[in-house]
Image (cartoon, grey):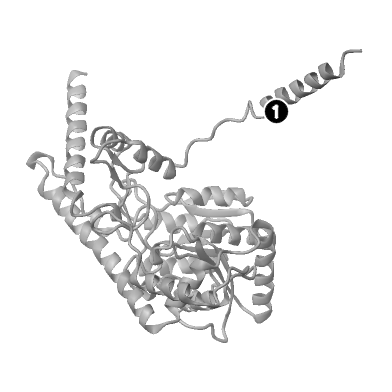
Amino acid sequence: SPPRWTVLLLVVGTAAENATLRWAALPVPPADPILGLKALFLADPSPSKMDLAVGAYRDDHGAPWVLPAVKTARDRLAADPDWTHEYLPIDGYAPFLRQSEALLYGGNADDDFFVASAQALSGTGAVRLALEFLRRHHDVTDVVYVPKTTWSNHRSIATDAGYAVREYRYLLAAESALDGAGLLEDLHNAKEGAIVLLHLCAHNPSGVDPSPATWAKIAEIVAERRLFPVFDSAYLGFATGDPDVDAAPFRSFVAKGLYPWACLSYSKNFGLYSERVGAVHATVPTAHAREAVVGHLKKVARAMYSNPPAFGARLVATVLSDAALRDSWRGSLREMAGRIQTLRHELRTRLEDAASPKRKRDWSHVTSQIGMFSFTGLSVEAVHRLRAEHHVYMLDNGRISMAGLNSGNLARFADAVLQVLDDIEKEHTTTHEEL
């Protein structure tokens, strides 16, 4: 028989070979379309590079902004001698949940409905938590309808939760205006009882929201087709600067007895991107339903992450429960929303005024859209040339984060867009003439 050390080497060698082969056929997935672009931006050595991809608010110097109310709340918490790092309950920090409910619903639930709430890991976690619950307990359908144009993660979340994802039309072909007729037709033809995912305000990625009249028609179809409405609210208060205005579509569904659910994120409207503060709020008809839904949301959460993080939730609760801090926060919302609206008008003006007389284009969609993002209408070719020739980083679908613009780069961005569009048009014209 061979020596023992030889047998040992053979065993170790076989184990190493098996370990190597185990992942040999596993393909490397493509980078996330947003975060992958951020990596390319960071690797670009150009001093004039411009990041218009990631949806995070920046001030006019291109720097992150810690809201004054959040800074005050943070200082208060740091000075609290009773501060600990104990686990939160599975469903989260109760004062935060009550304040979040009040912000969304406009006050406490009345005798006509109840609210079942659970804290979640920001908006992504809230959507996943809600869909995981519904997959187990809303057995009417295994289909989720999402807008054809939507946040890319929606499809991944729904698919990972076990749903078949179907689309409803949202934008017209030019991708600068709502396809109201197509949207309503597709929802009317949706499978009865299906879940329909709706953007509450400041639609991502287009910045195009339904009008109040269109929202009313959507509600009628939801009632007629017995659809299950789930609102994704990542920008409450960030669209118009007024949370009550932004929450109006959700509240109208509540008033109509449609028992909508909402998945809230406090990343954008509080600037708490890294704290992962979110919530699921489920409108239900009875106290028993509230207890049962919360209990099963907790069961889902327990198996996924056990307990949500405490710090961000305490910050939000501190701000919303204090009248002075709440007023300061609302003022910051108006400032952020107002600045973005100003940037929209300045960008449109520059694009129109700097264009050559022979190549005037319609840029009205820049100011008709709302919220952090704008669909520019630029082609993939134009987007790639902006990146290669001008170091401007934006998503391939033409979406830009308006908050990435400021007084120091807006004109340069507009001029680069016009230059690229003119060059493409000239090249295409020359090619056509040669043919």
* Camera-side residue of 107 and 209: 107
SS label for mark 1: helix
Q: Position of residue 258 (x, y in %)?
A: 54, 72
Residue 330, quarter of the rendered image: bottom left
Residue 213, quarter of the rendered image: bottom left
Q: Position of residue 181 (x, y in %)?
A: 39, 57
What residue is shown with label 1?
19
Q: Residue at x 56, y 54 (%)?
A: 144
Q: Quadrant of the C terminus?
A: top left
Q: Residue at x 22, y 54 (%)?
A: 406
Q: Is residue 244 visible?
A: yes
* Camera-side residue of 170 and 376: 376
Question: 258 above or below 342?
Answer: below
Lateral position of residue 405 relative to residue 160, left or right: left
Question: 392 above or below 341?
Answer: above
Question: 358 above or below 426?
Answer: below
Q: Quadrant of the N terminus?
A: top right
